Image (tube, helix red, strand yellow):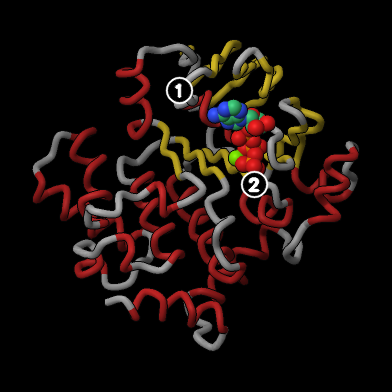
Amino acid sequence: MSLAVRDLRVEIGGHPVVDGVSFDVPDGARVGLIGESGSGKSLTALAILGLLPEGARATGSVRWNDREILGLPDAQLATLRGDDIGIVFQEPRTALNPIRTVGRQIGESVRIHEGVSRREALRRAVVEAERVALPDPERLVSRYPHQLSGGQRQRVAIAMALACRPRLLIADEPTTALDVTIQAGILSLLRTLVEDAGMSLVFITHDLAVLAQVATHAVVLEHGRVVEDGAVDDLLRAPSSPVTQALLRDATATLWHPERSASRAPASEGTDAGTPAATADRTDGEEER
Ligand SMILES: Nc1ncnc2c1ncn2[C@@H]1O[C@H](COP(=O)(O)OP(=O)(O)OP(=O)(O)O)[C@@H](O)[C@H]1O
Ligand SMILES: [Mg+2]
């Protein structure tokens, strides 16, 4: 279950925006795609998933388990997304449908991909909501996205992506819109879910401190090109490209060692009710009940 991207190019209106990107995601690996705004991270992910915007054209090769998936017909790509590859987008507010209950949205992909009844899909939605540690899942599934906090909405987006048990998860800046404390809880959750399921992960961020919490390998992009890649520990210790050096300087949060972050992070959102951010997340959800 591996992903191999080779010489991936994306052109928009004749301009190269992804310019010969190659990287591998071996089975069970956690790879971070990092770079400044506009470096081509999202378009790389969208090209892999066959979700490029109108007017964009991709060439090169994307192999999933040795099968070429770049340029597959839409119907086959749609099956692949969900069954094999799950996606979490940056902004849960736009990823979620405002007029559908979260239970229906989490259950939707199960219904489509596994052909189960509405009732069974809702039952699965409760299970999935519980898996991403959403509070009171039985009640929560009948609520609408605006009735949840930002952190809770992002957990719903993760539950949607994982409901069909994909083998690879692609997460594009899944925590950027969130407060740092909530972010730590979500990152820790993502990492635990990915590790427990033995899934592979492609995690997109512009923050090296965030990347270090979830990924073991990093691919650094600049102007649509890979300028450096390697083990995260090596990049942190001795970044060779000026871009990576700048990202290291800009790292906003404390650079936790990946092995230590898992035990530190959950306390912030889950048990440490005293922190303002944790309180804000919960209050946000409860106020609108
Ligand atoms: N729909 C589009 N039409 C035209 N140009 C686009 C479109 N989407 C992206 N681009 C351009 O392609 C380049 C790469 O965009 P991309 O969204 O992949 O960057 P990114 O690394 O994800 O940035 P960010 O960190 O801001 O999300 C940018 O220069 C952007 O302006
Ligand atoms: Mg982006």
Q: Position of residue 35 (x, y in %)?
A: 73, 40
- What amino acid type should be assigned to the residue bearing mark 1? Gly
The quarter of the rendering in which ligand 1 is drawn is top right
Name the residue tied to disc 1. Answer: 50
In-front residue for pair 170/37: 37
Which mark sits nearer the N-terminus, 2 or 1? Answer: 1
In-front residue for pair 7/15: 15
Alpha carbon separation for disc pair 2 and 1: 20 Å
Name the residue tied to disc 2. Answer: 205
Residue 138 visible from this viewpoint: yes
Lateral position of residue 160 relative to residue 118, left or right: right
Tell me where residue 56 sits by quadrant: top right
What residue appears at the point 59 percent right and 71 percent down from the top-left corner? 181
Q: Position of residue 262 (x, y in %)?
A: 59, 64
What residue appears at the point 53 percent right and 51 percent down from the top-left corner? 174
Does any atom of ligand 1 lie closer than 8 Å to the CB of label 1?
Answer: no
Element type where label 2 sits in the image: strand
Mark 2 residue crowding within 10 angstroms, few (<14) / some (14–19) / many (20+):
many
- What amino acid type should be assigned to the residue bearing mark 2? Thr
Q: Position of residue 162 (x, y in %)?
A: 37, 45
